[in-house]
Image: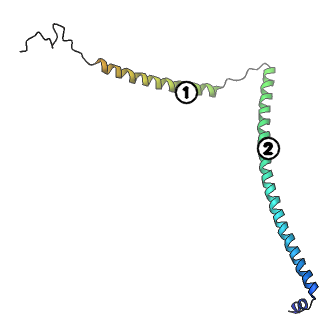
Amino acid sequence: MFGTHLLERRSKPERIADQAWQHLVSAVNNAGDSIRDSARTARHSSAGFAGDAGDLVESAAEEARHRASRAFDALAGRRPALPWTLLIGAALVGAAVGWAAGTAARAAGSRDRALEDIEFVDVNRPDSPADPTDPVS
């Protein structure tokens, strides 16, 4: 209560200066918040870029190590190992394709046999069951 009476007795220029000071402090605090937000956003986006660049460098380094190891083995006269996974995978794919082709060929062959089971009667044959010269009894 005592402080409120002192503020009311100030002169008009003092009150205006106090209001201006409060506006300035408020603006600096708001600007500080927006600067902090901008810095935080920049830090997150730069961290994303750095992470992507780190992944790229890591994969390039891994490839370089792999190539250097293979070059060292080649200079030492060692042959590279057979890619067993690739060979087994190719064999399984070949077996599946062969099985599918065999099944399709059997299905096509059984359809042809169904046409061969049809018996055609030749009416011009003398001992034919449908001989036109034979009187019907």
8 w.r.t. 17: above or below = below
**How many numbered discs sit on the rendered protein?**
2
Amino acid type shown at disc 1: Val
- The residue shown at (51%, 27%) is 96
Q: Which residue is mark 2?
A: 54
Counting from the top left corner in percent of width and height, residue 32 is at 85, 66
Counting from the top left corner in percent of width and height, residue 108 is at 39, 22
The alpha-carbon separation of the residues under discs 1 and 2 comes to 37 Å
Q: Which mark is residue 9?
A: none
How is the model colour-coded?
rainbow
Name the quadrant of the C terminus. top left
Pointer 1 or 2: first along the chain: 2
Amino acid type shown at disc 2: Gly
Q: Which residue is mark 1?
A: 93
**Which sits in the foreground, 23 or 83?**
23
Counting from the top left corner in percent of width and height, residue 55 is at 76, 42
